[in-house]
Amino acid sequence: MPPTDLKNNPALQAPKRSKPLFQPGTSENQALVIFVLGGPGAGKGTQCANIVRDYGFKHLSAGDLLREEQDRKGSEFGDMIKDYIKEGQIVPMEVTIQLLENAMTSTIDKNGNRKFLIDGFPRKMDQAVAFEEKVVRSKFTLFFDCPEETMRERLLDRGKTSGRADDNEESIKKRFRTFVETSMPVVEMFEKEGRVVKCDARKSPEEVYQGVRQEFEKEGIKPSGQ
Ligand code: C5P
Ligand code: MG
């Protein structure tokens, strides 16, 4: 990837902060964040939709936000994002963190929802550290554990209709490699801190969700209306 000078880009100059934008929680000046990680095709998006329906979280997919920005007319980052996604590499964190922060503040302003499932993030150590320093410390990371062969089958199947530029054999191989080399160390770091909740993602979506609900209960996260 060509080097990018994002540090001095005026669109990404988040104000310098001595503490995170939010404290963890759901009151004023707070936000509750659960990171959702797992290899490509582990079923993160599918499970997030269930959690949104039953627990009232707002789903923010880093990949979706990047694709949206890529397609936004006049975006100065569009071409760069496109190249990174095609190569299965991680877009420089300044862009992704800014997109997430903007989405969080606009959700809070719009409807007061302060509970966020941040899907497909942090995929790299620097993103994890910077987000927790600048935006908010996450409550925990929900990790969907799935063997590569299962994920590969799911992605190729999804590729028949997803229209995604990276749901093909060649990109999938690169995405797996990035996941193992760059994203797993993040999961391992959080695991050492005792902040990972693991779900077996090999089974059917319904069975996987059953596991998610049990884990949420253990963590004291209640369905909406309870
Ligand atoms: O999560 P999803 O599979 O939609 O991500 C697609 C691509 O978006 C990744 O392969 C990567 O190129 C980019 N991405 C990123 N940083 C993230 C999430 C996604 O660079 N935190
Ligand atoms: Mg996804």
Image (cartoon, rainbow, N blue to C red):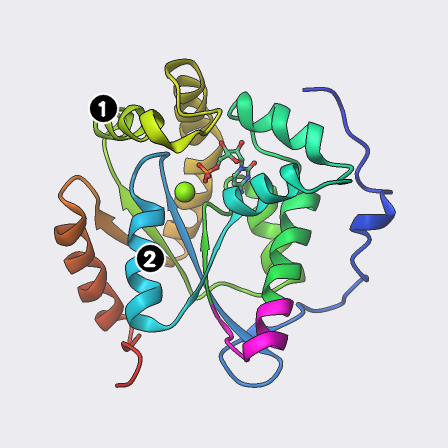
Few, some or many C-alpha atoms within 10 Å of disc 2 (few <14, some 14-19, many ≥20)? Answer: some
Residue 90 against residue 201 in the figure, above or below: above
* Image quadrant in which you'd find residue 211: bottom left
Q: Which mark is residue 149?
A: 1
Above or below 110: residue 175: above
User: Is the distance from the Cβ of mark 1 to the nearest ligand 1 atom less than 8 Å?
Assistant: no
> Residue 94 in the image: x percent, y percent?
70, 45
Q: Is residue 55 magenta?
A: no
Q: Is residue 114 magenta?
A: yes
- Judged by its main secondary structure, the magenta piece is helix
Label at residue 49? 2
Question: Mark 2 or mark 1: which is in front?
Answer: 2
Whole-percent x, y for residue 24 in the image: 52, 74
| Residue kind at label 2, given as amino acid type | Ala
Q: Type of residue at label 1?
A: Glu
**Range shown magenta:** 105-115
In the picture, the disc for residue 172 is none
Q: Is residue 43 left or right of residue 119?
A: left
Along the line of sight, the residue nearer the viewer: 144 or 103: 103
Quarter holding the C terminus? bottom left
Q: Residue at x 43, y 29 (%)?
A: 163
Q: Residue at x 35, y 26 (%)?
A: 159
Q: Quadrant of residue 139?
A: bottom left
Q: Which residue is more in the foreground, 148 or 17?
A: 148
